[in-house]
Amino acid sequence: MEPSSLSPQVARRLAVRAALLEGHRPTPDRAGILEVVRGLGSLQIDPTRAVERTHLLVLWSRLGPYDARDLDRLRFEDQLLFEYAAFIMPTESYPEQAFAMERFATRDGAWERRVRDWMAENDALRQSILARLKAEGPLPSRLFVAPPGTTDWKSSGWTGGRNVPQMFEFMSRRGEILVAGREGGQRLWDLAERVVGRAMPRDVVTPEGFAERRIRSAVSRLGLADPREIRDRVPILPSADVRAAIERLVAGGTLRKVTMQADPAAESYMLADDLPLMETVVGRGWRPRTTLLSPFDPLIRDRERTERIFGFHFRLEMYVPKDLRKFGYFVLPILHGDRLIGRVDPKMDRRRRVLDVRAVHVEPDAPVDDPEVGRAVGDAIRELGTFLRAKEVRYESIPEGWRAGLEQPSPA
């Protein structure tokens, strides 16, 4: 069967739709938050708060203004979400994630062996953590002291010698303990079985089953994906195992090969069940939105893929010296329908409750003379201000063609 050929527009729209950035928004409450996390599979956690933490921004881009406390309620009261390896995930995915935890504990890589050896040398520390959490419940790692004789975790980075926090991290990666809450920004740890409860796995997951499940979910959440993009989402298995799983899914009819008109020689994959969307997204079934994206948003987190599908070159300039930055410290790309048309350089001044927009940069092919596009972008920026509880949005540098749409009244 000949692969289907996708136009650049269809490829973009499939990616946007899969990222939950098209169509009607979910309700901005606990149910809507849960719907988004389940749809995306996970939320990446990053502490940078020049605007707002990235996992909160990712939800805002899909929900609009919402109560961020509802996310913590879903995690720590309802236990419908859990945190693992700097991601927030649906608790029902825990059995699958447990396979990754087991691979971390047993995989024969040099770094994994080093971790195992260090944990074995310091089992007294590990056992003391388990015993105290079992007896006392959720606690922060700062309340624990390494027993005499603990050997240092050696690292050239900032983790060197931080033996107690490192033991907590490694025990978490192995699935022994998980984050059960937060107190003043610090994580509270508890035994994993108390955090995820009934989601503890009872069935054995094979490497083949794990690979096929991960590939199906990755392709579904990307809309379409090439072999490299799929492989990057199953990093704990050898590349040969991932390729074999792709071939099984193609042979079984679950995946279909597709090509992009811009590069017919490069193969990508879609779920066979999603093939009808190639027509849906070019007709009345396409319902575009305009919003801003965190630099770590799932739609653009893979920079190579972002350039391949959207023709949008994006790099985070947070660690670039200020005088060498091209766009700004923590820039939010502008998604308008199926195109990335510009970038906003904002900073939230929480003391003054002012959202300072230092610049709105437009792409060369952006509709910069269209006032309706300017209004849509302005609405997105004002809505971000509402979410951040800003009393005012202030602009420094903006495109003249969008000025009227951007300079509307600020949020109350």
Image: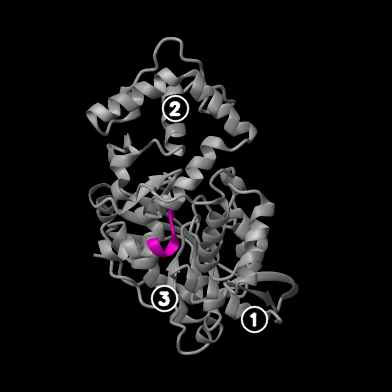
Q: Nearer the viewer, residue 184 or 35?
A: 35
Q: Residue at x 59, y 38 (%)?
A: 107
- Compared with 353, 7 (above or below) is below
Dot 3 lies on which element? helix
Place of residue 146 in the rendered image (x, y in percent of width and height, measured from the top left): 39, 17
Q: Residue extending furthest right?
A: 265
Q: Amino acid at mark 3?
A: Ala
Q: Quadrant of residue 326?
A: bottom right
Dot 2 lies on which element? helix
Q: Which residues are magenta?
A: 38-43
Q: Name the residue tied to disc 1.
A: 7
Place of residue 404 in the rendered image (x, y in percent of width and height, measured from the top left): 41, 76
Where is the C terminus found, in terms of image quarters?
A: bottom left
**Mark 1 or mark 2: which comes first in sequence?**
1
**Mark 1 or mark 3: which comes first in sequence?**
1
Q: Name the residue tied to disc 2.
A: 167
Judge from the rendering whether residue 153 lies leftward or rightward of residue 269; answer left or right: left
Of labels 1 and 2, the one closer to you: 2
Where is the N terminus found, in terms of image quarters?
A: bottom right
Mark-to-mark CA distance, 1 and 3: 26 Å
Q: Residue at x 41, y 59 (%)?
A: 58
Q: Name the residue tied to disc 3.
A: 376
Mark-to-mark CA distance, 3 and 2: 48 Å
Q: Residue at x 61, y 75 (%)?
A: 365
